[in-house]
Amino acid sequence: MTKKMTKKTTGNITEKQTVLTSKLTNGLKTYEIIDFYDLSYPHSSAQILKQKNEKRKTEIEEKINGEIETKTEPESENLLYRIIEPVLSSEKQLLFDKIISLLNDSINPNLFENKNKSKTELLKKSFFEILKIYSIRLSEKDAAEMFYFIERNFLKFCEISPLLDDKNIEDISCNGYDLPIYVFHQKYGSVKTTLSFSKPQLDLLVRRMAQSSKKHISVSNPMTDATMPDGSRVHLTLGNEITVKGSTFTIRKFNEKPFLPADLVSNKTFTAEMMAYLWLCVESNMNIIFAGGTASGKTTSLNAVCHFIPRHKKIVSIEDTREINLPHENWVSGISRAGSEAADEIMNSNSFSNYSKKLTLYDLLKAALRQRPEYILVGEIRGSEAYVLFQAMSTGHTTLSTMHAESVDTLIHRLENPPMNVPRVMIQTLDVLVVLAQTEENGHFYKKCLSVHEIIETDPQTSEILTQDIFNKQRAQSIDLFSNSVVLKRIQERKGWAKDELRREFEKRIRFLINEQKGEKENGEKENEEKENGEKENGEKENGEKENGEKENGEKGKKEKEMKIYDI
Ligand SMILES: Nc1ncnc2c1ncn2[C@@H]1O[C@H](COP(=O)(O)OP(=O)(O)O)[C@@H](O)[C@H]1O
Ligand SMILES: [Mg+2]
């Protein structure tokens, strides 16, 4: 679940940041702050600015046919995202530059190889050694601020690090030199930021991102996909070779706290009934595809329902980039390998040429079938692997996958045509199709399950694939699941349940999901309450300590949460 944004109104941090804000707002006077929250406490925070109304009107008043007309612009075009970080005075900046060059000279390349200490600890040690050797005296606050920048530049990704820390941001995109970076914000949609990079800065950053993922990018190989150390996926291009405006990057952020089924019920992506239905389906080996547009939440929903896979079942997952994250132990996770990457490997080693073999989803899926998996998960079906996937379904494997398609008709059309070419008789082995979409309501963005379809059979006369929507957001009245669902009937038969047993199991799962959701809310509220009380009572230092403690607790909580398998 996304963490609630905390708008700080009390404590020392606000005073400090108000000063910072007024300093930095120079030049942006036509904007007002509509939201403000911490990123990496206490050093970085985010501001959402909105262009003031009067200004906007005068700016877009246009003379049309001799008459002045005022056009209304879409909301998101008038929003701006700004990162607030400490400002170093020119004197401190000079000192900071000196410390950076001393650190650059003194840091041994093997420093970070020490597995017993965190990189941050090791860097901090080197920083304090330099202060000591060169008798540099800094106040506790100045040292903390400088170390914030040192860590950001040495261990993270410089200026974009705060954006990576923002849990509300889904995507970060940079379209070229000196162009503003855009983010996709869960609450405000696509928003321009005040951040941009010059040519040398951007080229360096792109090379660094590639390097940190052990990928190669150069003028002769100017494009690569990589997984960043935090699990985020990034697409990189270098120079003007293939992108006219210069180097680019697009980061699709990894959600370190995977959404659990109850989270997707509490944020209203699914109703408890839909989720309980999917629970029974996953448990009873039904084949499911999650379909939708880009960033509609397909992979997230697939990952969430995989928590329903019984604990000891053998799972094999196949993806182009690592996104699936499961608590199961009996799980083999496979990632495809592009040809260029393999070629890099040859360049960097003296391996034989068969090392350069490209390993596609198709190859991995064929290999997966030899591993006798009970559940096969495919990140996103796009090409010839679709045929193997449907073959796997026909031979009794349970498959859960995602595919780009907005409706049941487009899904079937895509499956039947090149490059997938799945015969119609095979398509009917699919049991359930879940259609998701990104929706906008009152200026806010949500991922929603629009409908759930059951594949019934192929009509013997017309050869049409018969389907029915068992849940549909647009239908005013829900239909009676138990008398209409063919999939629930299949489940009932497989499990050998009587009709009221099926109903009891279904209702038990709804109760479980609702209780989980309540527990989640209560915990969240308790945490917030504790945090607020702490803020009121404690000073800045104590607060800092508490935050650390909370972070640790959070991490512990996260582990426990990730480990959860929904067993009833
Ligand atoms: N149900 C949801 N509620 C809130 N955020 C979501 C939900 N599903 C996905 N997201 C977020 O949206 C982004 C895109 O989700 P993803 O599952 O990768 O989409 P897709 O696979 O359809 O491209 C991710 O940052 C993810 O955390
Ligand atoms: Mg996806």
Image: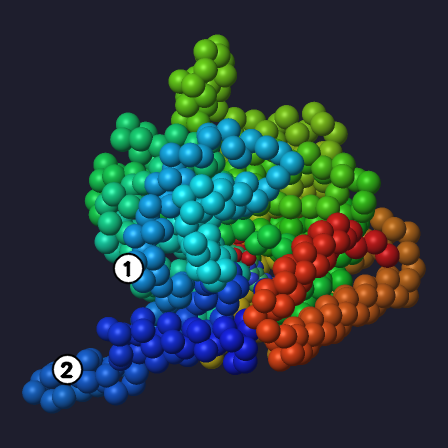
Q: As rendered, which of 363 and 344 lies closer to the eye?
A: 344
Q: Residue at the location (37% across, 72% down)?
A: 20
Q: Residue at the location (31% across, 73% down)?
A: 23
Please indicate whether residue 463 sits to the left or right of residue 186 in the image.
right
Whether residue 331 is visible here, answered yes or no, is yes
Q: As rendered, which of 354 and 555 lies closer to the eye?
A: 555
Please indicate whether residue 7 sits to the left or right of residue 340 in the image.
right
Q: Residue at the location (25% across, 43% down)?
A: 200
Q: Secondary structure at mark 2?
A: strand
Q: Position of residue 473 (x, y in %)?
A: 60, 71
Q: Considering only order in the chain, which callout, 2 or 1, is on the residue closer to the N terminus?
A: 2
> Which of the colour schemes (rainbow, by chain, secondary structure, one colour) is used?
rainbow
65 is higher (above) or lower (below) than 357: below
**Mark 1 = which residue?**
90
**Mark 2 = which residue?**
62
Figure quadrant of the N terminus: bottom right
Q: As rendered, which of 115 and 128 lies closer to the eye?
A: 128
Figure quadrant of the C terminus: bottom right
Q: Position of residue 264 (x, y in %)?
A: 65, 64
Q: Position of residue 369 (x, y in %)?
A: 68, 29
Please indicate whether residue 159 sits to the left or right of residue 460 in the image.
left
403 is higher (above) or lower (below) than 483: above
Q: Residue at the location (49% across, 42% down)?
A: 129
Q: Secondary structure at mark 1?
A: helix
Crowding at label 2, few (<14), some or many (≥20) Cα neighbours within 10 Å?
A: some
259 is higher (above) or lower (below) than 213: below
Whether residue 162 is visible here, answered yes or no, is no
The answer for how far apart the CA atoms under marks 1 and 2 are is 44 Å
